Amino acid sequence: MNGDGFSDAPASISSLFGVREGDRVYFGAQTGCTSTDCPPFVPLFVPGDLNDGSPRFAIGAKGLGDVNGDGFSDLVFFSPGAGAVYLFLGSPAGPPADPSRTITAEQGFGFSVAGM
């Protein structure tokens, strides 16, 4: 997602860890995680999937490839329960913490993203 040639990995973090962001993107590097350290990451604040006591909806994520043709991979989160799709566009710094675009419709919208 940051265009450095290494694969990046989205990950979900349990609310038991007490972090507000429920999701992160870890950046790939020449070496993997050790027992005490992992590569840098970007926290993603996905509405409905925050560990802040707000209503939670079933959330899923899919890598989309390069949606906008800028050379960086993009990521989408979908929440059919909320009727929303959240697009995170890649960049040299990785994805932004908040969605680049949010598309909403009636409840159930976004379900078909799960089948891509």
Image (cartoon, helix red, strand yellow):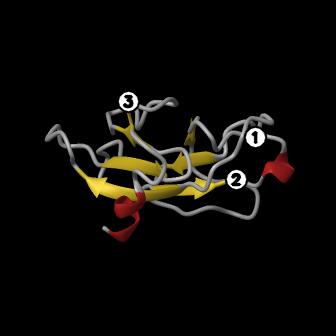
For the question of whether residue 98 can be seen, the reply is: yes
**Looking at the image, is mark 3 or mark 1 earlier in the sequence?**
1
- Give the quadrant of the C terminus: bottom left
Q: Which residue is mark 1?
A: 51
**Quadrant in the rendering for residue 33:** bottom right
Q: Residue at x 52, y 31 (%)?
A: 97
**Looking at the image, is mark 1 or mark 2 earlier in the sequence?**
2
Q: Position of residue 100 (x, y in %)?
A: 38, 30
What is the CA distance from the residue labelled 1 to the residue labelled 2? Answer: 9 Å
Image position of 50 (left or right of 78):
right
Along the line of sight, the residue nearer the viewer: 95 or 40:
95
Along the line of sight, the residue nearer the viewer: 51 or 105:
105
Along the line of sight, the residue nearer the viewer: 82 or 33:
82
Which residue ends up furthest to the bottom in the rendered image?
Answer: 115
Q: Position of residue 113 (x, y in %)?
A: 35, 60
Q: Are marks 2 and 3 in contact (CB under 8 Å)?
A: no
Q: 10 Å neighbourhood of mark 1: few (<14), some, or many (≥20)?
A: many
Q: Amino acid at mark 3?
A: Ser
Q: Which residue is mark 3?
A: 100
Q: Are marks 1 and 2 in contact (CB under 8 Å)?
A: yes
Q: How many marks?
A: 3
Q: Residue at x 21, y 46 (%)?
A: 67
**Looking at the image, is mark 2 or mark 3 earlier in the sequence?**
2
For the question of whether residue 6 can be seen, the reply is: no
